[in-house]
Amino acid sequence: MNDVLTLIPHIFKRFAMRGTYVSARPYGSGHINETFLVTSFDGNTHRRYLMQHLNTSIFDPHAVMENIQHVTQHLRKKLSYLSSVDLERRVLTLIPTRDGGVLAHDDTFGYWRAYLFIDNAKTFDILETPQQAFEAALTFGSFQQLLLDYDGPALIETMPDYHHTVKRFQAFQAAVKADPLGRASEIAPEIDFALRHEPLAHSLIDLKASGDIPERIIHNDTKLNNVLLDAESGQGLCVLDLDTVMPGLSLYDFGDMVRSACNPVAEDCPDPQQVIARADVFEALVLGYLKGTAGTLLPIEREHLFSSGQLLSFECGLRFLTDHLCGDTYFRTQRSGQNLDRGRTQFALVESLEKQRDRFRALIPRS
Ligand code: ADP
Ligand code: GN1
Ligand code: MG
């Protein structure tokens, strides 16, 4: 990390940032890229930027940046019709490089990008109030709504089969079988849980294959800390982390919100017994999402709002445990056993949602 920090002043100069470089520090708690808050001074005022060292072991940075440019351009165009909107707070703004691109490359670390840092706004790792859930879901829902008439170049499938839950299940099974680090014997209860819940992995994939549920452009990674809320008003502001924006099912976005927001404790909480899915948060998510998507969800999509939460928790649990078995190469970790704890909380969520099925389903308005 220190090595990266010493390089940042040089990378800073490659982007058309205003002012001279002052400082940088690691920022946020994303699991994929390395993120830094960078400050400059332009003689009058301090300016803040967000610089990211991209994780090119999981995606092609050029493809990702192409999608992000198309999507942010579309969002900016749509939102510019609303005169009261401050576009720089509502849509991510990429800072171009001095040679006119959006990626800077260095031989040691690889690829970098930079955004305007959106000030006076917050993301949350653990939800505090149902109102925050409502705002997050409203913002992700309207993000999807604004992209319904996207008419730019076709988006690239930057991470193929991203939410193909059957393939995620098979990858988990393969990891159990290969067991490269001899960790499988320590997770016998989780393996058993996964096997018992295998049918869940087929639920939305089968509906998608039958054509009963349409694909739309979705975010694909609607974790709570991927949306900014205004620090003063608490209102939803800006959708972040656009690396995975590509076609998918609307329900993937809703399900991942349930996964991340209904959990009352940290994603890596070492005590899964504390994971009891919050009904008040689920209700707020439903209302926010229905409002954000403005009547465009089909009856079949409404019908699966509850099960999508279970499915996405299951999928994420499989992914964390697969990574644990394979040596923690995908999700960034700060301690050993972290992906195991993350996996266990996800499975605890699946279970808690199951126990509360009727209560949660009754919270979804019929029309
Ligand atoms: P990762 O792909 O690793 O999850 P993100 O793009 O989600 O990285 O960024 C990590 C964190 O940085 C976010 O959770 C959010 O808190 C913060 N963040 C990202 N972009 C911005 C921005 N433009 N302005 C303010 N904060 C941001
Ligand atoms: C990752 O990038 P981040 O931290 O917002 C992951 C998501 C997982 C999430 C689990 C590109 O999200 O799919 O659901 O961790 N992103 C990618 O916390 O794999
Ligand atoms: Mg993120």
Image: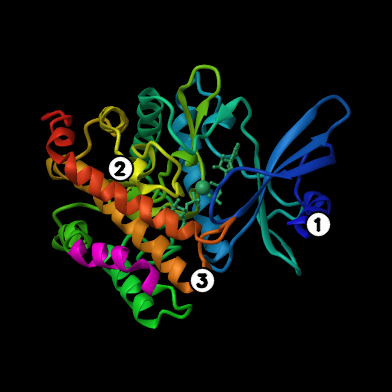
Q: Which amino acid does label 2 sit on?
A: Phe
Instruction: Find the magenta span and give its range.
Output: 185-198
Prevalent SS, magenta region: helix
Residue 254 is tagged as: 2
Q: Please name the amino acid that badge 1 sits on.
A: Leu
Q: Can you tell me which quadrant of the image ligand 1 is in?
A: top right
Q: Nearer the viewer, mark 2 or mark 3?
A: 3
Q: In which quarter of the image is the N terminus?
A: bottom right
User: Residue 45: which quarter of the image?
Assistant: top right
Q: Where is residue 249 in the image (x, y as percent from the top left)?
A: 27, 51
Q: In which quarter of the image is the C terminus?
A: top left
The residue under the point 13% across, 61% down is 210
Residue labelled 2 has its Cβ within 8 Å of some atom of ligand 2? no
* Residue at 35% in and 73% down: 171
Respond yes or no on whether mark 3 lies under 8 Å from ligand 2.
no
Is the residue 85 above or below the residue 174 in the image? above
Q: Residues within 10 Å of mark 3 (few under 14, many from 20)?
A: some
Label number found at residue 327: 3
Task: Pick whichever of labels 1 and 2 is earlier in the sequence.
Answer: 1
Earlier in the chain: of badge 1 and badge 3, it is: 1
Q: Which dot, 1 or 3, sits closer to the camera?
A: 3
